[in-house]
Image (spheres, helix red, strand yellow):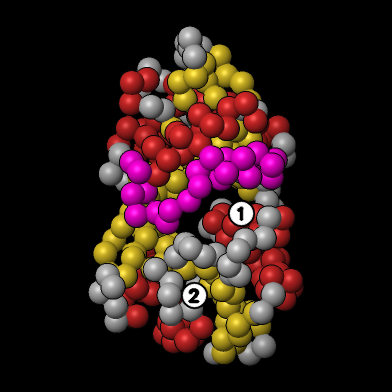
Amino acid sequence: MDAFVHSSLESFDAATLARLAADPVRNTVALTSLDRLRRLPGEHPPTLITFHDGGQVVGSLVRTPPWPFQAADLPLEAVELAVRTAAEIDPDAPGVTGPRERSEAFATATGEKYTESIATRLYRLEELVEPAVEGTGRLATEDDVELLGAWRAEFLAEAVPEAPDEQTTEAVRSSLRLGNGHAVWEVDGTVAWAVASLPQSGMTRIGPVYTPPEHRRHGYGAAVSAMVTRWALERGATDVVLFADLVNPVSNSIYQRIGYRPVEDWAEFLWKR
C-alpha cells in the first residue's frame, strides 16, 4: 500500500470526491469541511492524504487546521502507514477524530499519550416527527449574528471545551454567507438555535444546536432542530445526520423522539504534549 500527499484540494478531489460521496453519512465531516474550504479558503492549507493499493484509492486522511485528523475514510490496514505519513508532513496535528474503531487505532499506533476528549453518536434521520412546542421558528439573518456568535461561544465552552479558539461571531457570519440554514425558536424572545449545512452529495449535518440553560426543558431544542431538519429536506437532502454527545442522555433522547436513529459511535483523541 502507498500513501500520496496532495498539494492541492483539486488533486485530492479528483482522487476522492466520488469515493467520499458514495458514503456521505460516514464521510459527513470531510464533505462539509472540504466544501467550506473550496468556497472560503482558510489561512492554513489542509493536510490531504490518499492511500492506494494496486493503483486504486482505498482510503484517505484529512485535516483542516486547527482541527484534528479526520479518520472516517481511513481503512484499518492503512493505519500504520497513515501514522508515519502524518508524522512526517503534519507533526503539529493535535489529535484524531472519527468512528471509534478507526480513530482509536490511529491514536494507539502513534505511540503518543492521549486522552479521549469527546465521545459522540452519529444519528441519521429516518422520518421527521415535528413536535408541538410553544413558540414559533424563523430563519436567522445578519441581525442575529451577535447573539448567535455569543451562543456559539457558550456552546463550545460547554460541549467542546478543548476546541480550538475561534472568532465565534465571524464563524456564524461565514456560515450564513455559505448559505447554511440557521433557525431560531422564539417565545417572548429568542430561546434556541440550530444550524444545518447545505446538502453535500445529498447529505446535510445538523449542528450546533443550542438552548441557553434558562430556556431548557421546554422542548425548544427539539422544535428548532426539527425546523432546521425540515429546511434541509426542502433543499433536497436525502441523508440528514447529526452528532450527539454520549454523556448527554437528554440530547440523545430528544433527537430520537424527532425521528433520528443511531448509526455508529465516534471518538476524538487529543495528544498529551
The residue labelled by disc 1 is 32
Residue at the spot x=54%, y=31% of the render?
A: 146
Find numbered disc 2 in the image and state the secondary structure of the residue it sits on.
Answer: loop
Asked whether residue 175 is drawn in magenta, I would say yes
* Above or below, comparing residue 56 to residue 216 in the picture: below
User: What is the tally of numbered marks visible in this picture?
Assistant: 2
**Whether label 1 touches label 2, CB < 8 Å:** no
Residue at the spot x=65%, y=30% of the render?
A: 142
In whole angstroms, how far apart are the C-alphas of marks 1 and 2? 20 Å
User: Which stretch is magenta?
Assistant: 157-180
6 to the left or right of 195: right
Q: Amino acid at mark 2?
A: Pro
* Above or below, comparing residue 97 to residue 166 in the picture: below
Asked whether residue 120 is drawn in magenta, I would say no
The residue labelled by disc 2 is 75
Q: Amino acid at mark 1?
A: Thr
Q: Quadrant of residue 6?
A: bottom right
**Residue 260 appears in the picture as rendered:** no
Residue at the spot x=47%, y=62% of the render?
A: 67
Q: Position of residue 147 (x, y in %)?
A: 50, 29
Q: Earlier in the sequence, mark 1 or mark 2?
A: 1
Residue at the spot x=38%, y=75% of the render?
A: 106
Q: Quadrant of the C terminus?
A: bottom left
Q: Position of residue 70 (x, y in %)?
A: 49, 65
Q: Nearer the viewer, residue 103 or 40?
A: 40
Find numbered disc 1 in the image and state the secondary structure of the residue it sits on.
Answer: helix
Mark 1 or 2, closer to the camera: 1
110 to the left or right of 140: left
Q: Residues within 10 Å of mark 1 (few under 14, many from 20)?
A: some
